[in-house]
Image (cartoon, rainbow, N blue to C red):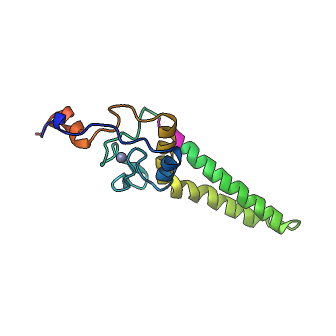
Amino acid sequence: MTASSLETTLPARPTTAALLVRGLTGACGACGKRRGLRRRWFTMVEHCPACGFRFEREPGHFIGAVGMSTIVTFGLLAVTLGVGFAVTAPDIPVVALTGVGLAISLVVPVVIHPLARTLWVAVDLAMHPLEPGEAVDPRVRLAEEGPTQQG
Ligand SMILES: [Zn+2]
């Protein structure tokens, strides 16, 4: 099979809502597939195994995922502390609320890390749609890169 015999067209452009759903559910923003996007909890594969989209579109791309994680964590922290103050005032349990706040600050970024990455990929795709050559069937990409050197 040669590279020219494979389909290399771009996937259909999803709506922004569809992109956000894909990101929030841990799917590839370009094609919507979920399987095989992570090696470990903190590590994504370089390319989508289904469509070949390279997730880190440029160096430092995933700093946006840190931003997503920070926004979610601080939002949850603000809501939790606000409700805690409102419900318990005037006898606010400072130690308990501090403990809850610390737990949120330490646990939430770790738990949402994979979704923060796929969400950022989706947000970035909504702002900067796929360009020709960005999502290429992995078989085509491997054929263009040529045989790997072994031994
Ligand atoms: Zn994909």
Exactly how many numbered labels are in the figure? 0
Placement of 62 over or under 23, stated as above or below: above
Placement of 58 over or under 107, stated as above or below: above
Q: Considering depth in this image, is 22 or 85 the residue closer to the camera?
A: 22
Residue 33, given in percent of the width and then of the height, sits at: 37, 53
Residue 25, given in percent of the width and then of the height, sits at: 47, 56
| Magenta range | 61-65
Q: Any magenta on residue 63?
A: yes
**Where does the C terminus fall, quadrant-wise?**
top left
Q: In this rendering, would 130 be left or right of 21?
A: left
Residue 101 visible in the snapshot: yes
The residue that appears at 48% across and 47% down in the rendered structure is 19
Residue 62 visible in the snapshot: no
Q: Considering depth in this image, is 10 or 27 the residue closer to the camera?
A: 10
The residue that appears at 49% across and 44% down in the rendered structure is 15
Placement of 26 over or under 65, stated as above or below: below
Q: In this rendering, would 95 be left or right of 22?
A: right
Q: In this rendering, would 31 be left or right of 66?
A: left
The residue that appears at 43% across and 46% down in the rendered structure is 29
